[in-house]
Image (tube, rainbow, N blue to C red):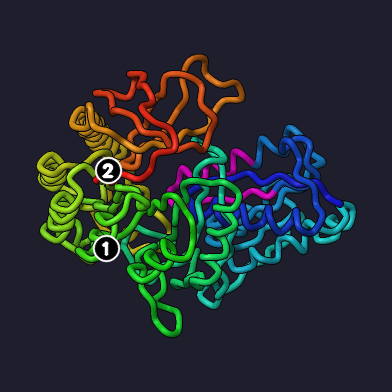
Amino acid sequence: MATFYIEQFGCRATQADGAAIERQLLERGSTLAESPETADVVVLNTCTVTAAADAQAREAIRKLHARNPATRIVVTGCYAQRAPEELAVLPGVSCVVGNSHKPQIPDLVAPAARSFVSIGSLSGAAPILSGDIFEHQEVLVAPVSGGEGSHTRPTLKIQDGCNNRCAFCVIPFVRGKSRSLPAERIIEEIDRLSDGGFREIVLSGINLGAWGRDLSPRQELIDLIPQILAETSAARLRLSSIEPLDVTRDLIALFRGTPRLAAHFHMPLQSGSDRILAAMHRWYRTEHYARRVELIREELPHAAIGADVIAGFPGESEEDHVLTLGFIEQHPFSYLHVFSYSSRPGTRAAALRGQLPASTIKRRARELRRLGEAKSAAFYLSQSGREQSALTLGHSGATPSPGWTPALSSNYLKLRLAGQFPANQLVTVLCPPNPDRLVEVQREGDFASSFA
């Protein structure tokens, strides 16, 4: 059987797709290689959210082919769905598989490696398997473990696709319409993870708050979460990014009621200017967003509140940028994810006048990141001396760091615990004033208190 390796790029949803492909290949008897250089087949799972992501994928293909010309490279993911022809002509690429045909990848890789050559093309360009993503109904599912917190915080994708049409975003055109994993499948996967000893599970989706609206009968995320808590033994659930209008008072009340829900909300902001939010075709204005922040603070005074922000959207004036800085400064954000605007072919924003010079975008992004760092430092300081529930993580390097163990609190503080602790343990600590301070563990295995 063919040996394989999956090279991952992009968001949690892309990583979840890669995990599902890996599970399917292993179930069919294929063997996971230790590195891409030793694999018969490398599945390159791409992102296309920015031009930089596209360039990163092309560079990875070039390096893979240079290091091992015999390796057959299957390129899939969002870039493969958006522009398969660009990838098919790159040296070393054996096949390009769009998101629409991603479930067929195991049929290409699982047979003996020798037969895989038969899908090659004599024309010089690799064959392309792609179609109408809006006809796609399946949600690839398998928990993801990897990166920081490897083998401790698996991500379970429960929703894919998006029905929104934000002007800057290409994702609906490469992911298709919103579709949900049925509740019974979610319960099954969470039971499997809990039985395996995992203490925290991250629920993710392209538009997580839209979960269930396509199911029959229609369901809502606010219905799913209590069901998971009632029917599984998951110690802690964490939600990934969720749109601000989906953060309701009832949803926040669920978090207030149990320490099994991580006190952490990541709500994309994108801009603090109502004019730019309208141009972006976002469904809210700053007053709506501010109210969500106020609701969270009323119910969960110490919860983490994170946001995505885009610097340099077409037509963004210096006044708009200042409004964004001011909005962030006025509200209790815990951290920011700052993105420099990148024009994506086929989006409304790509055709707008007022495209900004790269130097302006970089400067505005730099100012936003500086503000985000100040906000993070202030949040750490505000938590100093508070008792926190934290999950021990695995070290990102192969060799454990001497004398300390990384951990993540319920409210998303990255901590360094004094001493060596096994990964995937819940402990209670007193929060330090900054992330560089080592903290002593107060108790192990105590998860009975509320950390609101």
Badge 2 amino acid: Phe
Residue position marked by numbered label 1 in the rendering: 251
Q: Residue at x 66, y 35 (%)?
A: 63
Is 272 placed above or below 189 here?
above
Residue found at the far bottom of this picture = 217
- Which image quarter: residue 138? bottom right
Earlier-in-chain disc, 1 versus 2: 1
- Pick the residue in front: 437 or 257: 257
> What crowding class fits label 2: few (fewer than 14 Cα within 10 Å), some (14-19), or many (20 or more)?
many
> Is 125 on the left or on the right of 19, as rendered?
right
SS for dot 1? helix
In-front residue for pair 439/355:
439
Residue type pointed to by label 1 = Leu
Q: How many marks?
A: 2
Q: Nearer the viewer, mark 1 or mark 2?
A: 2
Residue 53: x %, y % from top left:
49, 45
Q: Residue at x 36, y 27 (%)?
A: 442
Q: Find numbered disc 2 in the image and state the secondary structure of the residue it sits on.
A: loop
88 versus 368 height, above or below: below
Cα gap from disc 1 to disc 2, whole angstroms: 17 Å
> Does 44 appear in magenta?
yes
Q: Position of residue 366 (x, y in %)?
A: 26, 32
* Residue 311 in sight here: no
**Residue placed at 85% from the left, 55% from the top?**
117
Q: Tell me, for residue 451, which label it has, or none.
A: 2
Q: Is residue 35 left or right of residue 372?
A: right
**Which residue lies at the image location 38% right of the left edge and 64% below the top edge?**
225
Q: Give the magenta range.
A: 43-60
